[in-house]
Structure formats: structure tokens, C-alpha cells
Image: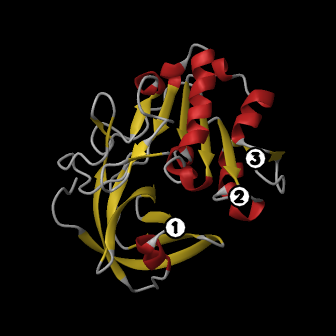
Amino acid sequence: MHDGMPITVKVTEIDEETPTVRTIRFDHSFTIRPGQFCMVWVPGVDEVPMGFSSANSITVQRVGEATEALTKLKVGDSFGIRGPFGNGFTPRGRVLAIGGGVGVVPLYPLAKEGSVKTFILGARTERELVFAHQLEDITDLRIATDDGSEGYHGFVTGVLDQDIDLVSYDTICVCGPEMMMKGILDRLERAGIASHGQFSLHRYMKCGIGVCGSCSIDPEGLRVCRDGPVFTGDRLLNSEFGTYARDASGQKKRP
């Protein structure tokens, strides 16, 4: 783990996953556990947290200034990485993974190592499905799209309700939009298996090493960067999860 200065990496390959998502491969391999993240430093722009999609790649969606700059990088360009940070997923027994949008990214290494039995992948439209072709070769893949252009017409929770026996899985690993994850946690709670869920949270981060407190979640003050980013469902039941998060100034906002 590198808590100090970022390691400078050089872009070796860029894969266009969707019209808005790029996988950036680089010339340094990190020792990661699936679900760990790094702080990515774009010189002159910003530093942002990002999940590893492999030991030597990140997968980026264009959503802000830093990610816009990352998606404009070319082979041979350089940027900085600090990490890996966080706890990652701890799969046990029969594993169900559920990824929404680029939430698939930290789950993908878990599937690649052979830990995932069933994978539910969601996106707004077929064109925005990330890693679908790779996942169908290594998991029992179920797809949901908001517009019905591929797979189930609707949200991933609809696939859960129609086709999945939740209690038959020992571990349910989830990453995606927070309201999607909250819907899944509600279902696990009703089934009496909230503790089987492992949810990867996204929060605003400044340092990534547990010092600044910007990513702390109420009421326990758990730091997403050090205590997470993956939390079991029972730990989240009485927290801010699915209700609010905090912006750069510490003000509450809808997740």
C-alpha cells in the first residue's frame, strides 16, 4: 500500500467499453483484492477515488472534470495512482454479484477470479452495458436495461424479484447507484439475510487514507476509505445509506 506520493504510471492501452466508458491500462501492476480502490491523480486537474478493474487498469466513466481528462488520455500519457486502499469483497460460498452501470467495475475482478456464480448486470441501455461479453463467459449472467434494449426491461431489482432465490446465496456483492443498492438491501433485510450482503459505497474523498474524515458516514463515523468501501448490509441498516450523503463542503445531499 502506498499512502504517500502517487506512483506515476504510463498508459499502455485504451479500450472503449461504451460511448462514455473507457478502460485505461497502464505499465504497473498493483497487488489488489477485488473491490479495493485507488486515488487517481490527474496532474493539473484533480485527484479522485476509483475502483481497479484489474491489477493494471481502471475503468472510467466521463462524469466530471477529472474523469473527462482521464478519458482524453492517449497511449504514452502519464498520471498518478495511490493505493490500493480499502477492504474489498470477502466472498464466501455461493456468490451473487449485482452491478449497476460502472458499479460493475469493482465486481469484475471478483468474477474474473472465479468467485461469482450468478451476475446481474444493469445499465440504462444496451449500449451502456460494461463487461457484458466478458461476464457471460465466466458467470451465469442476467441483464437488465432501463429501456428494455437488452435483457429484462427495468431495474436489476426486477430480476431479483422474478428470477433469483436470494436465500440460496451465501454472499451477495453489490455496487452501483446508491438507491439501487438500498433497494437490494431492503430485500435482503426482508429475507432475514442482510448480513449476507456486501455493498461497495461511493463517498466524496479527499485523502483516501482515513485522515480527513470527508467520507465518514453517520451515525458511527465509519470511514469509507479505511473501514470500507465495502460494508455488510447489517452494518448499513441504521445508517445514512440510501438517505443522504455529504458533498465537498460537508452538506447533506440525496445520494
Q: Quadrant of residue 90?
A: top left
Instruction: Say which label, 2 or 1, has the lower sequence index.
Output: 1
Here the colouring is secondary structure
Q: Is residue 254 left or right of residue 79?
A: right
Q: CA distance from mark 3 to mark 2?
A: 14 Å
User: Tag on residue 133?
Assistant: 2
Q: Residue furthest front?
A: 251
User: Tag on residue 43?
Assistant: none
Give the amino acid at mark 2.
His
Q: Nearer the viewer, mark 3 or mark 2?
A: 3
Q: Nearer the viewer, mark 1 or mark 3?
A: 1
Assign a secondary structure to mark 1: loop
Q: Is residue 41 above or below residue 84?
A: below
Whether residue 227 can be seen here: yes
Q: Residues within 10 Å of mark 1 (few under 14, many from 20)?
A: few
Where residue 32 sits in the image (x, y, percent)?
A: 36, 50
| Residue under numbered circle 1 | 63
Instruction: Say which label, 3 or 2, has the lower sequence index.
Output: 2
Marks 2 and 1 close (CB-CB < 8 Å): no
Q: Residue furthest top?
A: 192
User: Tag on residue 144?
Assistant: 3
Q: Is residue 115 above or below residue 150?
A: above
**Residue at 42% in and 33% down:** 240
Instruction: Say which label, 1 or 3, has the lower sequence index.
Output: 1
Q: Quadrant of residue 120?
A: top right
Marks 1 and 3 close (CB-CB < 8 Å): no
Marks 3 and 2 close (CB-CB < 8 Å): no
Give the amino acid at mark 1.
Val
Q: Is residue 164 above or below residue 248?
A: above
Where residue 180 sits in the image (x, y, percent)?
A: 61, 40
Assign a secondary structure to mark 2: helix
